[in-house]
Image (cartoon, rainbow, N blue to C red):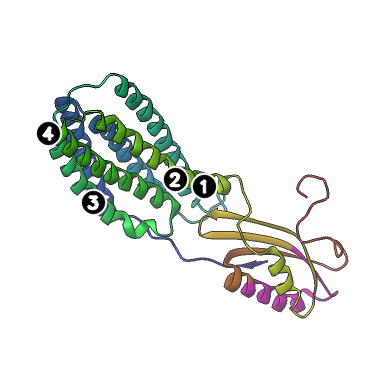
Amino acid sequence: MAEGHTHESGQMTGKKFFAVTVLNVAITVAEFVGGILSGSLSLISDAFHNLGDSLSIVFSYVANVLSTKRQDARNTYGYKRAQIITAFLNSIALVIICAFLVIEAVQRLSHPEPINGPLMLAVAVIGLVANGVSAYLLNRGSKNNLNMKATYLHIMSDALSSVAIIIGGVLIELFNWTLVDPIVTILVAVYIAYESLPIIRQTNGILMEGAPAIDYRGIKRDLMQIDGVLNVHHVHAWQIDENNIVFSAHVNLYDMKISEAEPIYSEIDRILKKKYHVCHSTIQAEAQRGKDEDIIYDQGEDIG
């Protein structure tokens, strides 16, 4: 068996977590109060969105901490999946929230209500500043981490909501276009849902043990160039998270001692790690068994 490890993804520190959580709670309270006083649906809807974000940040932080736990007898690949599960649930929650916002906004289009434009505008500006600070704090950790990316998307969608609400507040104040409020709500909700769907697809693929997008024919071609390798078959590949690929394969070798096969294992591991970014590989050596099989196991049967 050949094994490897990848670098740890960026973690959200306790101080950043606390700061972003406090900012989001403050925004939530301000938008609830401002939305009720001004009559703005977009502010109230954004307040619900921020409330969900506060919970999302807490869950993301807990998942981040949990993911750093080392492998044990219960989870031999570690706990990195905790972040994928959280990213999946956070993104689904975003889409559900967006659906409710659109329904409420459509109803408001049929029954417009008076809105206090200046108050709506002032609260939205405060929300934009706070969300901008939160997005800055989370930006670095979102680069290579789906869990942090989902949380960062929550915050960025809030910032976008604030921008849209500011524009709406200006139009309401200048032209008394109260229909701008539900229209802004719909536009922002559709955008947030659109941005969430790719994360849902990617995290669902990982949770379903979907194969990563790597060149399997290229792997077979490269491994068969190693002296002593006759065939590569019965390959399985999956992801622990978005940064860690696990790979297993049966490899036909000349009949040899285990000590003679170990250098071949090491070369296989080196190629898989360097060229295909595989963090952990398991190789089963065989002489004749499966020598005519293709790289992907497909015999019309279950996994074997």
Coordinates of residue 154 in the picture (x, y in percent): 34, 44
In terms of secondary structure, where does tag 3 sit? Answer: helix
Question: Is residue 72 visible from the viewing direction of this image?
Answer: yes
Residue placed furthest toward the front: 175
Give how far apart the Cα atoms at labels 1 and 3 are. 26 Å
Q: Quadrant of residue 106?
A: top left
Mark 2 closeness class: few <14, some 14–19, many ≥20 residues within 10 Å = many
Give the residues drawn in magenta, as a range. Answer: 250-271
**Which tag is nearer the camera, tag 4 or tag 2?**
4
Residue 87 got which mark?
Answer: 2
Residue 132 got which mark?
Answer: 3
| Circles 1 and 2 in contact, beta carbons < 8 Å | yes
Assign the N terminus to one quadrant of the image.
Answer: bottom right
At label 1, the amino acid type is: Thr
| Circles 4 and 2 in contact, beta carbons < 8 Å | no
Circle 1 residue: 203
At label 3, the amino acid type is: Gly
Circle 4 residue: 119
| Circles 2 and 3 in contact, beta carbons < 8 Å | no
Residue placed furthest toward the top: 111
Which of the marked residues, 4 or 2, is nearer the chain's N terminus?
A: 2
From the viewer's perspective, tell me whether residue 65 is left or right of residue 122: right
**Which tag is nearer the camera, tag 4 or tag 1?**
4
Give how far apart the Cα atoms at labels 4 and 2 are. 34 Å
Relative to 271, does residue 295 appear above or below in the rendering? Answer: above
Q: Main secondary structure of the magenta part?
A: helix
Q: Foreground residue, 101 or 284?
A: 101
Q: Foreground residue, 172 or 258?
A: 172
Relative to 153, does residue 234 appear above or below in the rendering? Answer: below
The residue at the point 26 percent across, 53 percent down is 16
Q: Foreground residue, 90 or 164?
A: 164
